[in-house]
Amino acid sequence: MLRLLEDKEKVSNIFRTARIQGLDTFEGLMLFGKDCCYIVDGFTLLCNREIHDIDSLPPESFDPILPSTTAANCSMSRNIRQSSKIFYEDIREIHKRRYLLQPIALEIFCGNGQNYLLSFPQKVRNKVFQKVTTMATQIAR
């Protein structure tokens, strides 16, 4: 996972997240660096603060952020992995969203037209929102 980071990048915060794309969800991590944040599918943060590949863990060893609705969805997320690097200066808007009728999601809009719908554990969403708004100075207020 370190290969995905910029040279000499220091990660200040790591949060568990689920990237939502259409009807599919992809469990992963959101990492905050100095100039950008990273969204990396296929990894999780355990209670002891260790980062592990989700495929190498038995399903009962961690609690998913979102419940899996189908077995096909679960197997699909293991095959397709995406990593994204979002420079703070590219973030134009961020909005708190509801997902599955719960206030657990954020939607991030970038200047290049990309957007990300991310779900977090309920107690974490507002912390991530504050972190993004602090780091991204280009956000329209």
Image: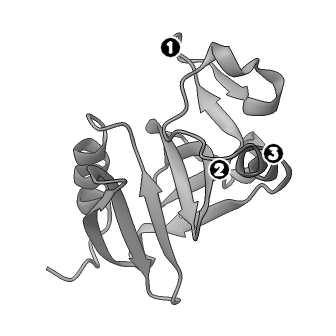
Instruction: Give the number of the mark in front: 2 or 3.
Output: 3
Question: In which quadrant will I find the N terminus?
Answer: top right
**Residue type indicated by callout 2:** Val
Q: Position of residue 74 (x, y in %)?
A: 73, 44
The reply to whether callout 1 and callout 3 are in contact (CB within 8 Å) is: no
Q: Nearer the viewer, mark 1 or mark 3?
A: 3
Q: Which residue is mark 1?
A: 47
Q: Considering depth in this image, is 32 or 67 the residue closer to the camera?
A: 67
| Residue for point 53% across, 17% down | 49
Q: Residues within 10 Å of mark 2 (few under 14, many from 20)?
A: many
Earlier-in-chain disc, 1 versus 2: 2
Q: What residue is rendered at 27% in x and 54% in y?
A: 129
Q: Position of residue 25 (x, y in %)?
A: 60, 54
Q: Residue at x 55, y 32 (%)?
A: 64
User: Where is residue 114 shown, x and y percent of the image?
Assistant: 53, 82
Q: Earlier in the sequence, mark 1 or mark 3?
A: 1
**Residue at numbered disc 2:** 40
Q: Is residue 54 above or below residue 127?
A: above
What amino acid is found at the position of numbered circle 1 in the picture? Cys
Specify whether 73 is left or right of 55. left
Spatial CA span between label 1 and label 2: 18 Å
Give residue 138's quadrant in the image: bottom left
Residue under label 3: 75
Report the coloring of the rendering.
one colour
